Amino acid sequence: MGNYRYIPEPQKELVLTMSLRGMKVKDIVDATGMCKRTVCRVRSTWKATGKVVRKPLHTGRPRKLTALHISYLESMIERQPDIYAKDLRDALVKVYDVDVSESTITRTLSRRGITRKMMTRPDA
């Protein structure tokens, strides 16, 4: 894209306002300095989505563990702080029929701020 330039969202909203107030595309192009294609794209994006910018709904693959699964894992850790990832995995399979790897569980918990277990040795 040789002639691409970033157009901020407020400027695109101004284009939409001009359009909704009855200005013709040619007049908007003259007033803003944008190309005709950009003005038309802003208008069509607004008609299709109700917004003036196109933003993806999500990026990447959806996560396997939902908020429900994560809260279940957190509650299990609260009840038994020294539980192993293998036991958490087995519980997820048993209760929710969700089969994920142990590393997926540890990475998910790490994102939630649970980074490692505190292991204590029983007093002899």
Image (cartoon, helix red, strand yellow):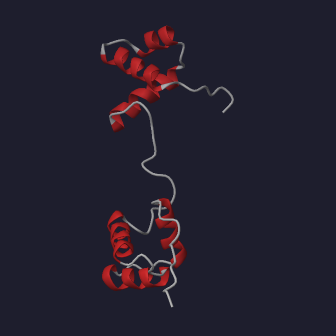
Farthest bottom residue in view = 124
Farthest right residue in view = 2
Query: Residue 82 versus residue 76: which sits nearer the camera?
Result: 82
What residue sits 42% from the left and 80% below the top?
Answer: 88
Q: Locate residue 110 relative to residue 91 in the image: left or right.
A: right
Q: Locate residue 106 relative to residue 75 in the image: left or right.
A: right
What residue sits 30% from the left and 13% below the top?
Answer: 21
Quadrant of residue 20 within the rendered picture: top left
Query: Residue 114 versus residue 102: which sits nearer the camera?
Result: 114
Image quarter in which the N terminus is found: top right
8 relative to 109, above or below: above
Q: Position of residue 41 (x, y in %)?
A: 46, 29
What residue sits 51% from the left and 73% below the top?
Answer: 118
Q: Locate residue 119 relative to residue 52 in the image: left or right.
A: right
Quadrant of residue 78 within the rendered picture: bottom left
Q: Position of residue 95 (x, y in %)?
A: 31, 82
